Amino acid sequence: MPDAGPAPKPPIEVIAASLRAERVRAGLSLTEVARRAGLAKSTLSQLESGTGNPSLETLWALCVALEIPFPRLVAVERPRVQVIRAGEGPAVGSEQSDYRATLLAASPPGARRDVYSVAAEPGPQRSSAPHPPGVVEHVVIGAGRALVGVADEPVELQPGDYICYPADVPHVFQALEPGTRAVLVSEHH
């Protein structure tokens, strides 16, 4: 049985280090990144210092501001053989609804896809702003039921159902049953 290696760093430590590195790489000040992301400079400073609890929406806004893919903020270096047990891995929650996305596999250089495990509970839908042009999302429901897809035409899905939709337009995910689980693949063109 392969060794899973050392325990991963807590997500906020990974996010803090990645955020700082990407901001410096882009040659941007804290003030400018905060302005572009629509955040207070103090919030960004706290995130870079490893304090705070950023929502999925905050992290997406930072990715857009820095013009980077989401996994660059939350992905950690992984060994060649990778096992992520249910409930483990770098998870980020939504501030809009009871929804958590766990990055399972970031696109390696040259590849253009990210894989997430989604756990969601009934309540308000998670509304996503458009991602960069050409992004497509693929979702397979593993348990429960959910409304998923383009914001003005979501589709009700049950276990085993699959949907593919453009994610460069507003889109949604809303759990309809407790314990709704899904796999989401974000494909970048």
Image: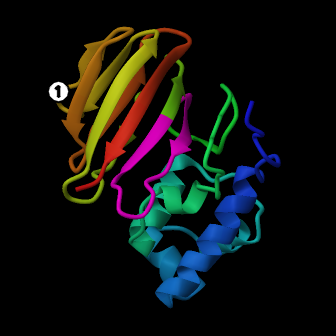
Image point (29%, 39%), residue name = 137
Question: Which quadrant of the view contains residue 21?
Answer: bottom right
Q: Residue furthest right?
A: 6
Residue extent of the magenta highlight: 97-116
**Front one among 45 and 117:** 117
As displayed, is residue 30 above or below residue 95? below
Badge 1: residue crowd in 10 Å (few <14, some 14–19, many ≥20): few
User: Which quarter shows the C terminus?
Assistant: bottom left
Say which amino acid is labelled 1. Glu
As displayed, is residue 25 above or below residue 158? below
Question: Which quadrant of the view contains residue 30?
Answer: bottom right
Question: Which residue is tagged 1?
Answer: 153
Q: Residue furthest front?
A: 1
Locate residue 38, reporting x and y percent. 46, 68
Locate residue 155, reporting x and y percent. 23, 19
User: Which quarter shows the N terminus?
Assistant: top right
**Front one among 13 and 97:** 13
Left or right: residue 177 versus residue 77 is left
Image point (53%, 19%), residue name = 121
Image point (41%, 28%), residue name = 125
- The color scheme shown is rainbow
